[in-house]
Amino acid sequence: MTVYLDNAASTPPAPEVLTAVTHVMTELYANPSSAHGLGAAAARALEQARAQVAALLRAQPAEIVFTCGGTEANALGVLGAAALARGRHVVVSAIEHPAVLRSAESLVGKGWQLDKVAPAPDGRVTVDAVLACLRPDTAVVAVMLANNEIGTLQPVAEIGRALRAAGRRLHFHVDAVQFAGLISLDVATLGADSLAISGHKLHGPKGTGALWLRKGARVAPLWDGGRQENGLRSGTENLPGWVGLGRAADLCRQNPQAGAAVAAQRDRLESLIVEAIPQATTTVPASTPRAPHIASIRLPVLPAEPLLHALEARGVYASAGAACSTRSHGPSHVLAAIGVREQDAVLRFSLSRLTTESDVTLAARALREAVDEIADVVKHRPRGARP
């Protein structure tokens, strides 16, 4: 039996999404920019998808720019804003996804200065810490809604209000890739200028995403070409993917209680693990505001990779930190920022609305067995040997 608990890395596409994508690929294959009737039909499908994504965010369709994924949407929000800025200072939280963090770091080579806001030990940045980093030349601020490794929710709306109250004319970008789809989201309440989402995090297709750009906010395109997407994202429209994203967004909007149900399953999983494994704890306090689908479990002085292999051998799929950093074998910048020791294993179990009680029970049992197995190996390993 397979128990898939790596949904923060990628969710399985919903059946309705697969149907929508197949329909477009077989019936609406014309270029949406073509002037003939088939092209017009494709264009109508594209605008319907745009309206569906906008509805999920409680935004206007004209504010949605389709992209190839969350990484491009984040880059457009950060680098696109920086390209039009007068200042040369950018502020980001130290626990941003690499899509934001590396975009900001790339600006340093172009004469910018970068400040990273450290989180508190509970994995959340504070409004005061962000404001303390501001300078007269600060042009871009980026803070994520939900962290992709430990699930902590950041006080984005409070930060947005504080930035506006301070009268700062800067671009505030928000990465909502791990937030949209499970938690009700109204972009108007955030005080943000742009916000990124990704299709494959909410049961849509891979290779799809969108940037919400507040009316009146401006970003420069990352490249030029045919001037699609209101001139901000040139290239022939990925109609099957974006229609699939629209359908996935619509399904999320129609199921506003999904987040609460997923959070209940996450809490049950954490309770079972902590009860069964004495040394296990949640990486951040369970009382910390968190995304409903991410359970981050800390296991002192155990190697993460062998634990993952032991789990997989039992049919349970999870990750160590974030999937985008797992294969790098380097320390997680998120875990380092909150003081987690490198010798401690931190496993991320990420759920979805498809996760069942049986999945949770089996995963907790498998982790207990995996910990016993790996701990026994570590106990009998010759001194100085690598795990």
Image (tube, rainbow, N blue to C red):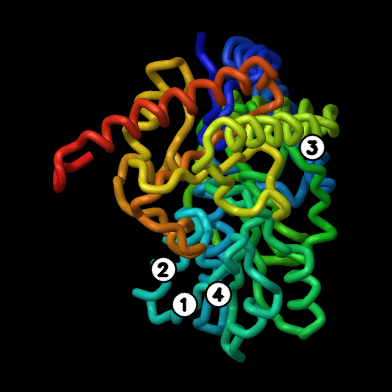
- Badge 2 vs badge 1, beta-carbon distance below 8 Å: yes
Q: Nearer the viewer, mark 1 or mark 3?
A: 1
Residue type indicated by callout 1: Leu
Q: Would residue 278 be found to the left or right of residue 260 on screen?
A: left
At label 2, the amino acid type is Glu
Of mark 2 and mark 4, the one earlier in the sequence is 4
User: Disc 4 marks which amino acid?
Assistant: Val
Quote the CA–CA distance across marks 2 and 1: 7 Å
Q: Which residue is mark 2?
A: 105
Q: Which mark is residue 91?
A: 4
Point 59% across, 73% down: residue: 140
Residue 154 in the image, given as x and y percentages of width and height:
68, 60
Secondary element at image label 3: helix
Residue named by callout 1: 114
Q: Are marks 4 and 1 in contact (CB under 8 Å)?
A: yes
Residue, disc 3 = 51
Q: Is residue 99 visible?
A: yes
Q: Label 4: few (<14), some or many (≥20) within 10 Å?
A: many
> For the residue labelled by badge 1, is the local secondary structure a helix, a strand or a loop?
strand
Between the residue at mark 2 and the residue at mark 3, the CA separation in whole angstroms equals: 34 Å
**Mark 2–mark 4 distance (CA, rounded to whole Å):** 10 Å
Marks 4/1: CA–CA distance: 6 Å
Total number of numbered discs in the rendering: 4
Mark 1: few/some/many CA within 10 Å (<14, 14-19, 20+): some
Q: Earlier in the sequence, mark 2 or mark 3?
A: 3
In 3D space, how far apart are the residues under numbered discs 4 and 3 (Cα atoms)? 32 Å
The quadrant in which residue 87 appears is: bottom right
Cα–Cα gap, marks 1 and 3: 36 Å
Toward the bottom, the furthest residue is 136
Residue 101 placement (x, y as % from top left): 47, 62
